[in-house]
Image: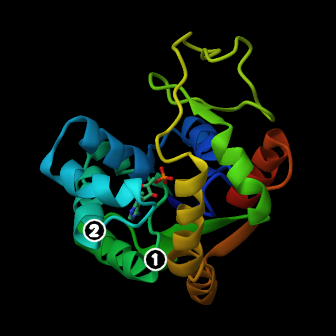
Amino acid sequence: MKKVFIFLGPPGSGKGTQTARLSDKLSIPHIDTGSLLRKNIEDESELGKIAKGFIDKGQLVPLNVVSSVIKNRLLKDDCNNGFILDGFPRSIEQARELEKILDETGKFSLVKDAMAIYFDIDTEILVERLVNRRSCPKCGTIYNLISNPPKIMDYCDICDTKLQIRKDDNEETARLRFETYQKETAPLYDYFKDLGILHELDAHKPINEIWENLKNIIIK
Ligand code: AMP
């Protein structure tokens, strides 16, 4: 079985929900560059200060910043048996960087050990999904007020913490994030296909059905 899973798809396509499930099932970490960058902003680190301006504008944070965040994370021992990448790579330049980082850390090879899973979805419905997204700052559970609401409005079902709205989940920034996705990230579809590591999921389906299809792809 492959050990490195790259989740590819536009913002709001459901990658985060499925990576959390897969991380639990395979007992491997879920590495999400967006959350790592937001943590750097919260901690007011030097990297966080640089990242903030780009995130607020829905643009990609420069390669050297993302690369350093990801490299530090992949060097940790909990990545030795594999990991799931959500939100990285986000451009062809970053995919080449990932290949370099994997070679440097000596843990895995992109072509032999990785699988890219593309969340195929009609982007028209995604702005509405993003503005209705809420997440738990404590346990990370993601909700959607329309398709997957919490039992008690605004509070996490699992740990009862007050849910948050991400600052960049407003309509204006969401639209900019889609533009960035189309320009920078969408070309990765062909890039991974040419490497022979691309698999596709129909992300319009209900969460549990996507999960069953994902398990079938991974176990094959
Ligand atoms: P996400 O949580 O994946 O939606 O990411 C939120 C924001 O963080 C994005 O809009 C980017 O500004 C930034 N970001 C996350 N991952 C990356 C990445 N791999 N490269 C550059 N910027 C990123």
Q: Position of residue 182 (x, y in %)?
A: 60, 76
Looking at the image, which residue is at 74% across and 60% down?
Answer: 217
The local crowd at label 1, few if under 14, some if 14 to 19, many if 20 or more residues have their Cα within 10 Å, is many
Q: Which residue is mark 2?
A: 106
Q: For the residue carrying disc 2, how many other residues have a C-alpha within 10 Å: few (<14), some (14-19), or many (20+)?
A: few
Q: Give the percent coordinates (x, y) of residue 214.
A: 73, 53
Residue 214 numbered mark, or none? none
Rendered view: 62 above or below 7 = below
- Residue 20 visible (yes or no): yes
Callout 1 amino acid: Ser
Q: For disc 1, does the CB lie below 8 Å from ligand 1?
A: yes
State left or right for residue 48 relative to residue 46: right
The quarter of the picture where residue 42 lies is top left
- Secondary structure of the residue carrying numbered label 2: loop
Q: From where the camera sits, is residue 202 visible?
A: no
Q: Is mark 2 within 8 Å of ligand 1?
A: no
Q: Residue farthest to the bottom?
A: 194
Q: Earlier in the sequence, mark 1 or mark 2?
A: 1
Q: Amino acid at mark 2?
A: Gly
The relative height of residue 104 versus residue 132 in the rendered view (above or below) is: below
Which of the four quarters of the rendered structure image does ligand 1 lie in?
bottom left
In the picture of the structure, the residue carrying the numbered disc 1 is 91
Report x, y in % for residue 82. 44, 53
Q: Quadrant of the N terminus?
A: bottom right
- The outermost residue toward the front is 172
